[in-house]
Image (tube, grey):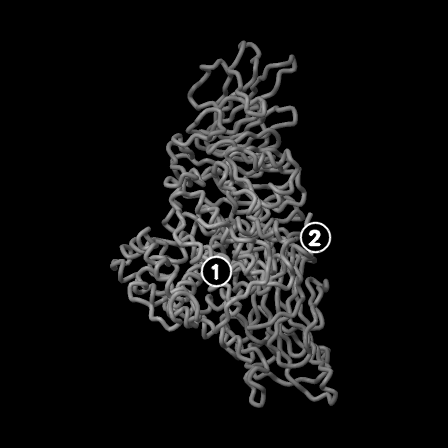
């Protein structure tokens, strides 16, 4: 291996040349033909199936023939792009499928009607809002970059030392290092036990500015300190926990964790149903499924630095063959441990809450759990099992296995669906007691709120020219007080005498121009038309709703109103060609039930001083989302949707 | 806390370069899952070292060099990933992929359009083998075809897509 390359930034003389032309450098003439046996090697490389021998042969071709390098790069880049494109497509599909399932009954289903808006040159916040952009593949790439960037960069780099230690200094966790100074591979490889699969308004008690790592892998030993909000972790086994802030949770096992404060809900379904394949509870991008659905898992077992403990699920959501290095005892069962209790899953969904004094409350939603009190002295029962101590000296209860009963002398209680128990320190001091209690289960969050698409319609989508648009009406005309509202009509814009690109052509699959008639009628200069569409927010949280759109207008949009409340409009032209979109966003003014969106289009044009009648038309594309389910008014927001970008810019069009 | 403007500048540059960087790492590692991991690690380093970057100079070239070092780190740490490509070849490939005319941040736009133009069978094949990463042998078995036949189809599809993308980009560039 050669020395590392200098990373000092210096302008690099880059080879020029036309796209996919052969440069005159390297070990062969630029026009040297590519040998026939190069192509099967390229096929194998693109298929990710290159053997060692083939790799050596490929290197020979590439090192000696610039044309082969050119082809190789072109094909690999294409292959890379296809993978990223498909990820974007699938993330959108996953999100929609989940949303439809969750909001179908009740509240009423909401589906996306319009194709997602492209996000060319997205501003930063939009880059982070990959879930909103949905199918736009590139934003997926960039979002994944920042998932990693913010996780590794901000956590290990910025956080206070105590936080850093909980995240990055474990022998089993990955550290970020500065290239050229220290390699991450100089340390033991991390052990990953799952993924962050859902985030809702998470704020961190030790790093308020940290942006949650949706989709990123969860390393064994990592502690999540939530100040507020929700975070869902999906273990590789399929088990899930939803943490609700404030809480401290350490992922100290492939099959559980240590909850020192706050509350969580764990879901481990019995009998294999919903386990193993990474059931997507969150409705957000499930990286686990993305990673594995392709039919090819990473070859974890063959790697000395296994990056994941992918597990089978016998008998429950873990792999007893792969005990956690941090877990006091290897357990085949999913277990949540607290300062005073061990809650062991028997195939169920249950909640655990730990108070500041360590008292633990457990509630079973479905199935059965065993709650075992843990303490140095159990009232009335003498000494119990001594909790083990972790490296930091913190007292940790030993992991209990269902069925071990009272062998240790520690009291246990088995809870069935609807039952609760509290484990608390005895007022007399020292010991802990377990009491069955009747608790309201409403205090636990069992599902993450979801960003749900708002059912919106682009102008003219799915129509033929001349068709009335059932979703858009023209409700007012400034030069006609007696004007009766009519359905807007998909109008042809291919007028004789117009320049070829006077208007962006209609695209029935996406959006079309609307006007008062099919033939792009001319109207007086001073006329202003009000286009109106309505949409519903049933079952969605109005305070969380957001719409973004882009429009083209002949001649000018003078107002955008949601329920009578004006939204800002970016600068845009009065004059043709009308082929450069203007973007806008609406973040306020949403109400439960029916919402009214109005667009005022003026026919005024500064150049039309003679007041000659001219066409008026509007083309508009919309998409929007709101939170479905969960608590609150959505102020906290969901991580993927913190848009607030530089809307209103005029962007270039196709 | 990083300055927001600086942060946005970084995002913009990274967005433009990320396609080339990820493809380059793929080209060196020949393993798509590993490549994504190294890509993410490279992005972290890029951000940390962003103060070293001089505005107005070639961000992509700088990013590619850092990515190359991360690939070397990765290969060194994983014995089964011995350096398949020599450093010299890695540098040659870096030069190849860093061509300014190949900086095409909207490449996925063109690809998306071109994918839609494929017939259903070809599009599905590309999705399965390149999108989802299924083994060619598995896809072949599913389709009751021979692996070689699937390879041949994929090669043809790649050719069609490359031509389509090239034409699309040329149209974009036409005044």
Give SS at disc 2. Answer: loop
**Pointer 1 with pointer 2, Cβ within 8 A:** no
Callout 1: residue from which chain?
B
Residue A382, located in which quarter of the rendered image?
A: top right
Residue A539 visible, this angle: no
Q: CA distance from mark 1 to mark 2?
A: 31 Å
**Looking at the image, which residue is at 51% across and 70% down?**
B101
Are tags 1 and 2 found on a single chain?
yes
**Location of the C terminus of chain A (image quadrant):** bottom right
Callout 2: residue from which chain?
B
Eyeballing the image, is A378 above or below A505?
Answer: above
Eyeballing the image, is B87 above or below B98?
Answer: above
Q: In the picture provided, is A406 more to the left or to the right than A512?
A: left
Eyeballing the image, is A554 above or below A435?
Answer: below
Residue A644 visible, this angle: yes
Counting residues from the N terminus, which is met first, the one under dot 1 or under dot 2?
2
- List x then y, in percent, for residue A603: 69, 80
**Looking at the image, which residue is at 49% across and 44% down?**
A281
Q: Nearer the viewer, residue A222 or B10?
A: B10
Q: In the picture provided, is A243 more to the left or to the right than A289?
A: right
Query: What residue did someone put label 2 on?
Result: B3
Query: What residue did someone put label 1 on?
Result: B94
At label 1, counting other C-alpha atoms closer than 10 Å, the crowd grade (few under 14, some 14-19, many 20 or more) is many
Residue A598, located in which quarter of the rendered image?
A: bottom right
At label 2, counting other C-alpha atoms closer than 10 Å, the crowd grade (few under 14, some 14-19, many 20 or more) is few
Q: Nearer the viewer, residue B17 or B66?
A: B66
Q: In the picture provided, is A15 more to the left or to the right than A595?
A: left
User: Which mark's residue is nearer the viewer, 1 or 2?
Assistant: 1
């Amino acid at each position: 291996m050669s020395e590392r390359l200098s990373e000092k930034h210096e302008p690099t003389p880059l080879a020029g040349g036309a796209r996919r032309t052969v440069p005159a450098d390297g070990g062969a003439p630029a026009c040297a033909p590519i040998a026939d046996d190069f192509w099967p090697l390229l096929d194998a490389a693109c298929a990710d199936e290159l053997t060692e021998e083939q790799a050596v042969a490929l290197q020979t071709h590439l090192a000696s023939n610039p044309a082969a390098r050119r082809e190789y790069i072109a094909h690999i880049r294409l292959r890379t792009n296809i993978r990223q494109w498909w990820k974007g497509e699938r993330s959108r599909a996953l999100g929609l499928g989940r949303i439809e399932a969750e909001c179908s009954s009740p509240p009423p289903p909401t589906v996306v009607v319009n194709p997602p808006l492209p996000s060319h040159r997205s501003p930063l916040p939009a880059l982070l809002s990959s879930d909103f952009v949905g199918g736009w593949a590139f934003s997926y790439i960039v979002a994944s970059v920042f998932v990693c960037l913010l996780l590794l960069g901000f956590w290990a780099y910025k956080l206070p030392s105590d936080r850093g230690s909980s995240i990055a200094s474990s022998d089993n966790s990955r550290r970020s290092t500065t290239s050229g100074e220290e390699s991450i591979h100089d340390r033991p490889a991390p052990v990953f036990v799952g993924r962050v699969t859902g985030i809702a308004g998470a704020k961190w008690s030790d790093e308020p500015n940290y942006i949650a790592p949706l989709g990123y892998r969860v390393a064994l030993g990592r502690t999540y300190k939530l100040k507020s909000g929700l975070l869902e972790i999906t273990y590789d086994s399929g088990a899930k926990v939803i943490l609700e802030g404030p809480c401290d949770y350490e992922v100290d096992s492939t099959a559980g964790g240590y909850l020192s404060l706050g509350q969580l809900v764990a879901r481990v379904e019995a009998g294999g149903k919903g386990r193993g394949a990474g059931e997507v509870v969150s409705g957000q991008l499930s990286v686990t499924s993305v990673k594995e659905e392709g039919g090819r898992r990473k070859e974890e077992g063959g790697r000395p630095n296994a990056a994941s403990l992918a597990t089978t699920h016998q008998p429950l959501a873990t792999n007893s063959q792969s005990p956690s290095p941090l877990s006091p005892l290897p357990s085949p069962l999913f277990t949540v441990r607290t300062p005073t209790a061990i809650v062991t899953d028997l195939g169920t969904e249950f909640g655990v809450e730990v108070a500041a004094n360590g008292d633990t409350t457990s509630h079973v939603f479905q199935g059965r759990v065993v709650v075992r009190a843990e303490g140095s002295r159990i009232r009335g029962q003498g000494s119990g099992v001594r909790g083990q101590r972790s490296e930091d000296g913190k007292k940790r209860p030993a992991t209990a296995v269902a069925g071990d009963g009272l062998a240790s002398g520690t009291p246990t209680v088995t809870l069935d669906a609807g039952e609760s128990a509290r484990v608390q320190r005895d007022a007399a001091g020292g010991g802990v007691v377990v009491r069955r209690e009747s608790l309201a289960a409403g205090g636990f969050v069992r599902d993450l709120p979801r960003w749900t698409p708002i059912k919106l319609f682009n102008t003219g989508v799915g129509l033929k020219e001349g068709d009335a648009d059932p979703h858009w009406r023209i409700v007012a005309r400034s030069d006609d007080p007696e004007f009766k509202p009519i359905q807007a009509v998909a109008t042809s814009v291919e007028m004789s005498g117009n320049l070829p690109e006077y208007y962006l052509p209609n695209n029935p699959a996406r959006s079309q121009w609307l006007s008062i008639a099919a033939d792009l009628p001319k109207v007086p200069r001073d006329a202003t038309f009000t286009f109106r569409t309505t949409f519903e927010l049933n079952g969605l949280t109005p305070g969380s709703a957001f719409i973004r759109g882009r429009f083209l207008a002949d001649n000018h949009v003078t107002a955008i109103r949601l329920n009578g409340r004006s939204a800002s409009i970016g600068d845009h032209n009065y004059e043709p060609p009308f082929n450069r979109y203007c973007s806008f966003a609406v973040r306020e003014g949403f109400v439960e039930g029916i919402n009214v969106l109005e667009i005022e289009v003026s026919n005024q044009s500064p150049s039309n001083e003679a007041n000659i009648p001219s066409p008026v038309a509007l083309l508009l594309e919309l998409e929007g989302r709101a939170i479905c389910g969960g608590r609150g008014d959505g102020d906290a927001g969901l991580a993927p949707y913190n848009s607030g970008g530089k809307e209103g810019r005029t962007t270039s069009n196709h | 806390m990083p300055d927001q403007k600086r942060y946005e500048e970084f995002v913009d540059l990274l967005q433009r370069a990320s396609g080339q960087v990820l493809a380059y790492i793929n080209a060196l590692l020949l393993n798509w899952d590993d490549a994504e991991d190294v890509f993410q690690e490279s992005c972290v380093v890029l951000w940390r070292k962003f103060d070293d970057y001089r505005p107005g100079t070639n961000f992509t070239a700088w990013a590619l060099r850092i990515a190359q070092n991360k690939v070397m780190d990765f290969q060194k740490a994983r014995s089964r990933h011995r350096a398949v490509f020599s450093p010299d070849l890695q540098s040659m490939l870096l030069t190849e992929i860093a061509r300014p005319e190949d900086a095409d941040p909207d490449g996925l736009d063109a690809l998306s359009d071109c994918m839609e133009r494929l017939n259903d069978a070809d599009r599905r094949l590309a999705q399965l083998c390149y999108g989802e990463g299924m083994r060619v042998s598995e896809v072949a078995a599913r389709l009751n075809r021979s692996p070689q036949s699937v390879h041949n189809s994929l090669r043809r599809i790649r050719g069609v897509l490359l031509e389509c993308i090239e034409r699309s980009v040329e149209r974009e560039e036409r005044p």
